[in-house]
Image (tube, grey):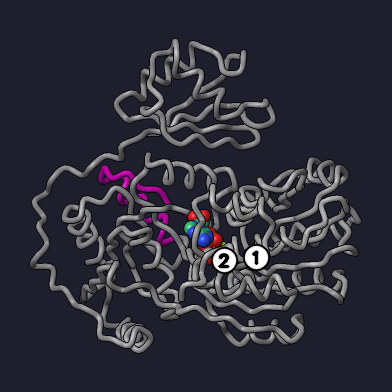
């Protein structure tokens, strides 16, 4: 198809040139299929894998229909987690750069209520949030949806998994019945079909091939008699592949924590990510993994949803998921953007039927590896390239990335390329620096000032 350029769509010139500046030249398949319908005002059910560009699909639609002079909430995007809501809001802001004065607000749980009320009083065009918190604002009367024209349910299957069904229902009951509703979901279980028939009106359905380009992901399966043998194999796999970033999927929070603890005790750089973590610890784990100062993340499926890592080297399934689509979803996190990915699955005989289901979904047999090809000289485990410094000041102290960069570069003597990702939260900021410079950068920040004030700084190794 030669017509997958954005300029075939009836978009404003400024939107088109903004897309160009974002290096979005061609539409992704889901965008090509759904955007004409979305721009036409149709309700939509879209089924597509992670990383297929769903955010821009609805984002461009929301912005196209937005009346900037009308200072009311015109669109609402519901997401399963705060991390995802933050990512969506970030992408919407990038897309909205071409339009002046678009106010986009995130409303999520785990954040203080008061400031959200304040922001709402200032007005917003687009709200992105998690269902629980949105419902609370509606109940308190601090949010009103009577002028809403577009509702987006992003990752609807995950929202149901997380028990948000009632909240979603209650929110929808307060939306005008004349509206456009867009539902995005990676999987399409019966519950989603029911939701679609309850809340959508004459929707078009768009499905984009849910399987990844298999050639870019090397998949190997390993059979083990007992679960307790899995740890040793994981060590051999890490020694063999020497990955810089790995996600290991486990089912339970306890398994995640135990495995991460065991790896840490054995000298690996590993952290657990699961639903029992406090929001602040969760932020910290995601920051440290995504800025390359932690190399192994042991996560549950739900917790790993918020992860947006461009180049994950290896995905390990400590256990296979029951649902074969979850398998496809997990391994799709490696081998993105042209990188060759590696997905390794550890299987005990009890999980055999899960392999069968994966094979029938893939339409192919899986490849078993007996492990003999693994080169497992106990080479020292590669340390992550960066370390994280945590500064006790953030957005509330008006700290911006440039302030932190400025405190380390220039007179301070560090080069910009020695400094990695900078993440600013309301009360904390994180900066990644090259590992061998960690101590020197720590001292520099402790002795100097950021934004004109002394700050407390800690280093995570
Ligand atoms: P999904 O929600 O489907 O998992 P995202 O919306 O997060 O996927 O998009 C995945 C990545 O693809 C993002 O980094 C986004 O910036 C990028 N992207 C989206 N649309 C395009 C496009 N048309 N061209 C290039 N990159 C795109
Ligand atoms: Mg998404």
How many callouts does the rendering have? 2
Magenta span covers which residues?
Answer: 254-273
Q: Please tell me the numbered disc located at residue 85.
A: none
> Quarter of the image holding residue 213?
bottom left
Q: Does the magenta stretch include residue 260?
A: yes
Question: Disc number at residue 54?
Answer: 2
Query: Does any atom of ligand 1 lie closer than 8 Å to the CB of label 2?
Result: yes
State the image coordinates of residue 124 (x, y, percent, origin top left): 81, 49
x 77%, y 67%: residue: 150
Give the SS element for disc 1.
helix
Residue drawn at x 58%, y 35% as measured from the top left = 424
Label 2: how many Cα within 10 Å (few below 14, some 14–19, many 20+): many
Q: Which of 13 and 455 is in front in this view?
A: 13
Quarter of the image where one finds residue 82? bottom right
Residues under numbered marks 2 and 1 in contact, where contact means CB atoms less than 8 Å apart: yes
At 67% from the left and 26% from the top, the residue drawn is: 398
User: Crowdedness of circle 1 by 10 Å Cα count: few (<14), some, many (20+)?
Assistant: many
Q: Which of 459/68 is in front?
A: 68
In three-dimensional space, the C-alpha distance between marks 2 and 1, rounded to whole angstroms, equals 7 Å
Instruction: Name the secondary structure under disc 2.
Output: helix
Q: Which residue is tagged 1?
A: 58
Query: Magenta span has 78?
Result: no
Q: Quarter of the image containing the C terminus?
A: top left
Q: Can residue 302 be seen in this view?
A: no
């Amino acid at each position: 198809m030669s017509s997958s350029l954005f300029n075939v769509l009836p978009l404003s010139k400024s939107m088109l040139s903004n897309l160009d500046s974002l290096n979005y030249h061609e539409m992704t398949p889901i965008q090509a299929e759904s955007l004409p319908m979305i721009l036409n005002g149709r309700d939509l059910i879209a089924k597509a894998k992670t990383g297929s560009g769903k955010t821009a699909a609805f984002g461009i639609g929301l912005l196209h229909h937005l009346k900037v002079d009308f200072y009311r909430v015109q669109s609402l995007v519901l997401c399963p987690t705060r991390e995802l809501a933050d990512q969506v809001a970030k992408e919407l802001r990038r897309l909205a750069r071409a339009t002046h004065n678009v106010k986009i607000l995130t409303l999520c749980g785990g954040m203080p209520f008061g400031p959200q009320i304040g922001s709402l009083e200032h007005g917003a065009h687009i709200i992105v949030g998690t269902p629980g918190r949105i419902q609370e604002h509606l109940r308190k009367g601090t949010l009103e949806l009577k002028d809403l024209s577009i509702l987006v349910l992003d990752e609807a299957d995950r929202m149901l998994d997380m028990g948000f069904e009632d909240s979603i229902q209650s929110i929808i009951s307060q939306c005008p019945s004349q509206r456009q509703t867009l539902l995005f979901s990676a999987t399409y279980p019966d519950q989603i079909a029911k939701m679609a028939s309850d809340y959508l009106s004459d929707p078009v359905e768009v499905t984009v091939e849910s399987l990844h380009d298999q050639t870019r992901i090397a998949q190997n399966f390993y059979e083990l008699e007992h679960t307790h043998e899995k740890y040793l194999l994981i060590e051999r796999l890490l020694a063999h592949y020497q990955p810089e970033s790995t996600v290991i999927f486990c089912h339970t929070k306890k398994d995640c924590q135990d495995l991460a603890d065991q790896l840490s005790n054995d000298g690996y750089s590993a952290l657990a990510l699961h639903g029992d973590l406090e929001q602040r610890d969760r932020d910290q784990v995601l920051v440290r993994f995504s800025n390359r100062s932690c190399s192994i993340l042991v996560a549950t499926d739900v917790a790993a949803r918020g992860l947006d890592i461009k180049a994950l080297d290896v995905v390990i399934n400590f256990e296979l998921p029951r649902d074969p689509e979850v398998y496809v979803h997990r391994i799709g996190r490696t081998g993105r953007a042209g990188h060759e990915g590696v997905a390794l699955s550890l299987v005990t005989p009890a999980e055999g039927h899960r392999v069968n289901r994966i094979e029938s979904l893939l339409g192919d047999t899986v490849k078993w590896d007996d492990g003999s090809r693994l080169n497992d000289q106990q080479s020292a485990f590669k340390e992550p390239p960066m370390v994280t410094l945590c500064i006790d000041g953030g957005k509330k102290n008006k700290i911006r990335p440039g302030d932190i960069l400025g405190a380390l570069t220039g007179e301070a003597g560090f080069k910009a390329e020695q400094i990695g990702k900078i993440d600013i939260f309301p009360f904390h900021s994180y900066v990644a620096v090259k590992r061998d410079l960690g101590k020197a950068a720590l001292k520099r920040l402790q002795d100097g000032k950021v934004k004109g004030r002394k700050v407390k700084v800690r280093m995570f190794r």
